[in-house]
């Protein structure tokens, strides 16, 4: 009887220990999962805060520069103490127009980035000739288009793309090339076709892009090591719209001795089409 009672007591102790260990292990597992979730949430918040800081830093520069120029020009026009002739007044008005255009581009870039991050870009594909797309982009550049030299192959073919989206791609690539080139250096645009693809190459003679940066520069708010301040949105948007239209964009080093960089836009060619291209 005594032996049975002892064994029963041992069983109860073992059961209590087992249950206690089970509760402790379960609580530790729950706490571990909770801490894991908190760590993930903290890292997510940290990354979001880092992105927010990068966005504010980049956008603040792109806002501050044109706003400063607009304020200086408008104060010059409004000051009764400054006597301006017609040419000087026109120059100040032109400064305001240029800087307003820069602000408009920044707003458009932010809106485009928001649309691309929300999901696949909606497209309205139409048949276009490549020279018409390039001409449309050059027209938006205004006087700076005079620095762009084009060289198209014979019968480079057609593309079926969303015209406004490809317009943005080309404008962003051209503006990037102009930005990193000396005003005295030309920008070369060449177009080739073959193998069912069309290649548009935009070459500048700027400082070039480090090999480690050639992919990273296509991420939003990222800039190459040779770049100055700015939002870093143009190339990210260009790649997003290019890929939405079945294309690709990449960067290559320019040939010596001129150096610089070459941005290549590859698009699927349309061999035959019944409708008239744009």
Image: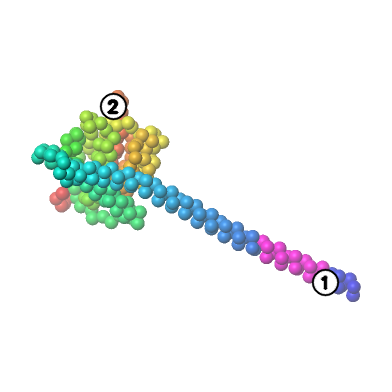
Q: Are marks 2 and 1 in contact (CB under 8 Å)?
A: no
When the figure is inspected, residue 12 is found, relative to residue 61, above or below; the finding is below
Residue 8 bears which disc, if any?
1
Name of the residue lying farthest toward the bottom: 1
User: Which residue, given by chain and number where applicable, does mark 2 sit on?
Assistant: 258
For the stretch drawn in magenta, the main secondary structure is helix
When the figure is inspected, residue 127 is found, relative to residue 16, above or below; the finding is above
Name of the residue lying farthest toward the top: 257
Q: Secondary structure at mark 1?
A: helix
Q: Is residue 260 left or right of residue 84?
A: right
Q: Secondary structure at mark 2?
A: loop
Which image quarter: residue 150? top left
Q: Is residue 130 left or right of residue 264?
A: left
Q: Residue at x 26, y 43 (%)?
A: 68
- Does residue 89 show up? yes
Q: Is residue 93 left or right of residue 2?
A: left
Q: Residue at x 75, y 65 (%)?
A: 17
Question: Considering only order in the chain, which callout, 1 or 2, is on the residue closer to the N terminus?
Answer: 1
The percent coordinates of residue 169 (x first, y second) are 26, 45
For marks 2 and 1, give the one nearer the viewer.
2
Q: Callout 1 environment at 10 Å: few (<14), some (14 to 19), or many (20+)? A: few
The percent coordinates of residue 9 (x first, y second) are 82, 70
The percent coordinates of residue 36 (x first, y second) are 56, 56
- Does residue 140 show up? no
Q: Residue at x 24, y 40 (%)?
A: 174
Give the spatial CA distance, label 2 vs label 1.
Answer: 92 Å
Q: Callout 2 environment at 10 Å: few (<14), some (14 to 19), or many (20+)? A: few
Q: Is-magenta flag for residue 265?
A: no
Q: Which residues are magenta?
A: 8-25
Which image quadrant: the N terminus?
bottom right
The percent coordinates of residue 254 (x first, y second) are 31, 30
């Amino acid at each position: 009887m005594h032996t049975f009672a002892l064994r029963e007591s041992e069983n109860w102790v073992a059961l209590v220990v087992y249950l206690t260990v089970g509760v402790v292990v379960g609580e530790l597992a729950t706490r571990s999962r909770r801490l894991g979730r908190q760590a993930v949430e903290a890292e997510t918040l940290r990354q979001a805060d880092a992105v927010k800081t990068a966005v504010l830093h980049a956008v603040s520069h792109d806002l501050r520069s044109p706003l400063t120029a607009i304020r200086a020009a408008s104060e010059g026009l409004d000051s009764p103490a400054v006597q301006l002739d017609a040419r000087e007044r026109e120059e100040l008005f032109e400064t305001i127009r240029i800087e307003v255009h820069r602000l408009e581009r920044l707003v458009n870039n932010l809106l485009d980035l928001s649309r691309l991050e929300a999901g696949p870009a909606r497209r309205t594909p139409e048949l276009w000739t490549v020279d018409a797309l390039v001409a449309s982009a050059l027209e938006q550049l205004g006087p700076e288009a005079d620095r762009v030299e084009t060289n198209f192959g014979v019968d480079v073919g057609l593309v079926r793309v969303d015209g406004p989206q490809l317009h943005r791609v080309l404008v962003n690539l051209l503006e990037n090339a102009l930005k990193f080139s000396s005003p005295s250096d030309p920008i070369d645009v060449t177009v080739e076709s073959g193998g069912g693809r069309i290649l548009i190459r935009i070459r500048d003679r700027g400082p070039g892009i480090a090999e480690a940066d050639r992919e990273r520069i296509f991420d939003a708010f990222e800039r190459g090591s040779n770049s100055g301040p700015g939002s870093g949105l143009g190339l990210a948007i260009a790649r997003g719209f290019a890929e939405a239209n079945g294309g690709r964009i990449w960067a290559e080093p320019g040939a010596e001795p001129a150096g610089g960089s070459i941005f290549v836009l590859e698009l699927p060619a349309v061999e035959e089409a019944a409708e008239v291209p744009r």
